[in-house]
Image: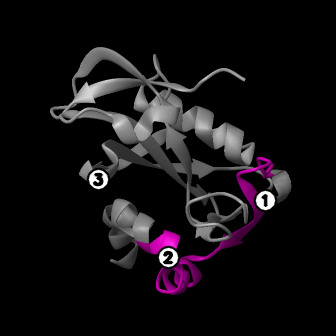
Amino acid sequence: MSAEIWDLYDEQGNKTGETWERSRAGEIPEGRCHIVCDILIRHRDGEFLLTRRDPNKKPYPGCLEASAGGSVLAGETAEEGARREMKEETGLEAGPLEQVSVTHRPGSKSVIYAYLAVVDCAKDAVVLQEGETVDYMWVDYPTLTKLIAEDEVLQVQYPRYKPYLDQLES
């Protein structure tokens, strides 16, 4: 298996021409960051896809997630990375993606691009990625908001999707 390589960006979001190996993520130099994508998946009927993390996956083993996502690979745009991650982690293809937010996380030296993908597929078409996820469920908006209050990963993800979810409240 080849090493995962990321492009590095400066604090203004400009690609620096430098690359970095994932295994050295904790050593990214000051003033540099890598891009992460996060995709909230909503079915055309209004329900949201939640997945359960593999109990051996760190951090947050066994927790729920309201997204597919991960680090963008060298040479990819944030949107290309989002499409790839969504396909890898759920088996679902993204149609148009709506960018919901951009979050800077200085502690992890990352910038997270959050997207919404609305899918029109059979709900049993989800294919889990071994080592990443072990289960999934589709939930309506009231259930999602209830689970956000109870699950630590959903609480971390919630601010990224708040601009979109606030629109559903009104």
Question: Which numbered disc, 3 or 2, marks the residue that appears first in the sequence?
Answer: 3
Disc 3 and disc 2 in contact, CB within 8 angstroms: no
Q: Which residue is mark 3?
A: 107
Using the image as rendered, state which of residue 7 and residue 41 is in the foreground. 7
Residue 149 within the segment the image draws in magenta: yes
Real-space Cα distance between discs 1 and 3?
36 Å
Real-space Cα distance between discs 3 and 2?
18 Å
The type of residue carrying mark 2 is Glu
* Circle 2 residues within 10 Å: few <14, some 14–19, many ≥20: some
Residue 140 within the segment the image draws in magenta: yes
The type of residue carrying mark 3 is Gly
Q: Which residue is mark 1?
A: 123
Quarter of image, res 122: bottom right
Q: Which residue is mark 2?
A: 152
The type of residue carrying mark 1 is Lys
Using the image as rendered, state which of residue 118 and residue 144 is in the foreground. 144
